[in-house]
Image: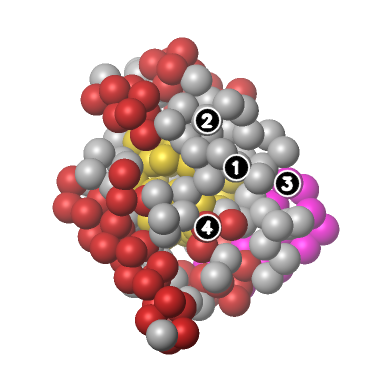
Amino acid sequence: MTLKRQSSPKRKLMTAARIAAAHLPPGLPPVFFLTDPQRTPDPARIARLLPEGWGIIHRHFGAADAEVVAAQLATISRQRHLRLLIAADPQLVLQVGADGVHWPHARLAQSRQWKDRMGLMTASAHSPAELRAIAGFPIDAALVSAIFPSASPSAGKPLGAPAFRRLAHTAPCPVYALGGVNAGNAASVAPFAGLAAVDGLMH
């Protein structure tokens, strides 16, 4: 009974990931694991457990060990065939050989000058207006938040799966659900979005 309870969340998340992968364009991972210096103090441990084809967005927020961690994640990503993006730091992307960059919405305009040097670029969107604003920029996918109640201090009022579905259908690019995504709710958004999480992949 205990073993079944422990493995059930993993099975649910893997199933949701397969559903997401079926409708996302080639090259986009079904799931992104987002790092955070405070909430994920050992991102390499989690990266080593991610299934092949999943992705990582390394958000270092100016941490002193940003380059060391990025290089470590780049090595793991090559070994495990993961897609690695680095948030708001295209120079570090080039330095460690990552796949591309994730842009905060406030820096979206910078994506234009890097479009020919990055294999993959994503951007954040925290409202319908921010998602619409991505149109016209060389962005491959948008991470929309918050979808579910989240422990993140920056998370706003959650959209919920029904409202997110309507938003996804009019989005200018593929979208990922971010904010409170976990094994218990991933299936409700996987049919029309990719999955992105911090705490939801911790275990």
- Report the number of discs: 4
Q: Which residues are magenta?
A: 60-74
What residue is pinned by disc 3? 61
State yes or no: residue 73 in magenta. Answer: yes
What residue is pinned by disc 2? 158
Residue farthest to the left, as pictured: 22
Counting residues from the N terminus, which is met first, the one under dot 3 or under dot 2? 3
Give amino acid for label 4: Gly
Alpha carbon separation for disc pair 3 and 4: 20 Å
Give the residue at x 46% y 55%: 182
Counting residues from the N terminus, which is met first, the one under dot 1 or under dot 2? 1
Q: Nearer the viewer, mark 1 or mark 3?
A: 1
Counting residues from the N terminus, which is met first, the one under dot 3 or under dot 4? 3
Q: Where 71 falls versus 196 (above or below)?
A: below
User: What secondary structure is found at the residue carrying circle 1?
Assistant: loop
* Marks 1,2: beta carbons within 8 A: yes
* Marks 3,4: beta carbons within 8 A: no
Q: Of residues 170 and 199, which is closer to you in this image?
A: 199
User: What secondary structure is found at the residue carrying circle 4?
Assistant: helix
Mark drawn on residue 35: none
What residue is pinned by disc 1? 150
